[in-house]
Amino acid sequence: MELIVVLLVLGLVVYGIIKDYNPQAVLALAGMALFAVAYWSGIHPILPADKSTGFALFDLFEVFKGIFSKRAAALGLTIMAVAGFATYMSHIGASQALVRAAVRPLAGVRSSYVLLMACYLISIFVSLFVTSATGLGLLLMVTMYPVMRNLGISPGAAVGVIASSQAFEIGPTMTNAIFAAGQSGLDPTTYFVDYQVWLVVPMVLVTMLLHYVWQRHCDRRAGWDPVAHRGDAAELDEVRSSEVEAPALYGLLPMIPFVLMMVFSKLMISDVKLSVEVAMLLTVFAGMACELLRTRSLRESLSGFGSFLDGMGKVFGPVVALIVCAELFAESLKAIGAINALLHSADGVGLGVTFMTLVLVGLIMGAAVVMGSGNASFLSFATLAPEVAAKFGVPAVTMLLPMQLASSIGRTVSPIAAVIIACAGIAKVSPFEIVRRTSVPMAGALVTALSLNYAFFM
């Protein structure tokens, strides 16, 4: 009976997400429904006896409150600080200055497809410091896209490269990476240095080569000759009009948190502890000091702090609340026994941790394509990994790492992802054409990630 209820609820969750119902509400209601079934079936209490309110309905919302309190005060604050930082860097033009400086060396490249590979490498470098996939995509459309088009690269190939710039979400300041590190019991810097780098560096090289082969193949099938299109202009006036001009030195500001996190870690100075939030706040106040020197206006320099706070607030509902509701749903699956049943079934037919990792990766990958969001898919299901990993006696990071990478890869092949729609719209190309352009490089990246994760960590 419980299995039928779980399958029914899961079906309703999938239906609600596909039909674009609010995912937070869908997950919260599904979680409370499963908790209620587990309680009334005598499988699992909603709360332990010493924490119960004495009334089951109140207990349901007490569980919700407890998860909210725990996540919003810790991980939620970290994610909001990252989002506020990204908003502030864009507000003062620092992100734009970084991208302009990174793109400048491309002017000397004369081979179209060599330029395409160079553009991909530069976009990956910049993605370490610009944490928004859509924000980075739009910045690259303003700065990098015209350079590629001028050398004859087709709109589809150019946007395919730009749209995959945040396909891996690497670094200690990325939302999914921070969450994966927390679920693994690691700090974000350790997660990045000891685990992510070992997979992502080969993934980047494989993806770069596949972009070269696949984009050229697609261009040839479409009859596109780069030589015949050299000198083509990109009509981006409407995007350029919103670009914030800032001094070139501002390009260093987005790099400061990353550098601080690397310096004050076990790599260099381990005696001093530095959190992501502090690194972000320090840089924001450094930016305010720079704005004071540039504008000579205390009022204007201080007003920028409002954009930092606005950025924090905007991510609370879409991301922090999603984490809370997803964890409530995950806890309900554990309470009703669905996870244990799945593990026993896998064990009974001789399937181990590798199979379960592939199941969770496939689940997150599919959810990312359907939702168009790497954050939504990963945050919804990542909390299941630690318990599954514990059952098999392996570190949680061995499952969470490929899951985290799969979430952003899945977003990069979703025709409804914001970064795909935004970049395709500017280039006047179909989102489905962009997904076709990213599909083969992303498939290669996923296979590389799974293979290396199995070889190195399992």
Image (cartoon, rainbow, N blue to C red):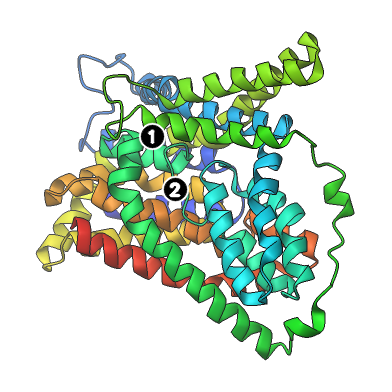
**Residue ID at (76%, 76%):** 152
Q: Which mark is residue 254?
A: none
Label 2 secondary element: loop
Q: Position of residue 304 (x, y in %)?
A: 72, 20
Q: Position of residue 401 (x, y in %)?
A: 33, 51
Q: Is residue 232 left or right of residue 222?
A: right
Q: Is residue 439 above or below residue 371?
A: below
Q: Is residue 246 above or below residue 346?
A: above
Residue nearest the viewer, comparing 174 with 325: 174
Q: Which mark is residue 262?
A: 1
Q: Position of residue 161 (x, y in %)?
A: 61, 65
**Residue ID at (54%, 36%):** 255
Residue nearest the viewer, comparing 99 with 38: 99
User: Farthest residue in the front direction?
Assistant: 108
Q: Would residue 332 be visible to someone looking at this image?
A: no
**Residue ID at (54%, 81%):** 213
Give the residue type that dot 1 points to. Answer: Met
Which mark is nearer the camera, 2 or 1? Answer: 1
Q: Position of residue 191 (x, y in %)?
A: 32, 42
The residue carrying pointer 2 sits among few (fewer than 14), some (14 to 19) or many (20 or more) residues within 10 Å by Cα, namely: many
Which circle's residue, 2 or 1, is located before the other in the chain? 2
Quarter of image, res 52 = top left
Per the image, the residue denoted by label 2 is 170
Q: Is residue 178 above or below residue 287?
A: below
Residue nearest the viewer, comparing 77 with 247: 247
Quarter of image, res 419 = bottom right
Give the residue type that dot 2 points to. Answer: Ile
Q: Would residue 206 be visible to someone looking at this image?
A: yes
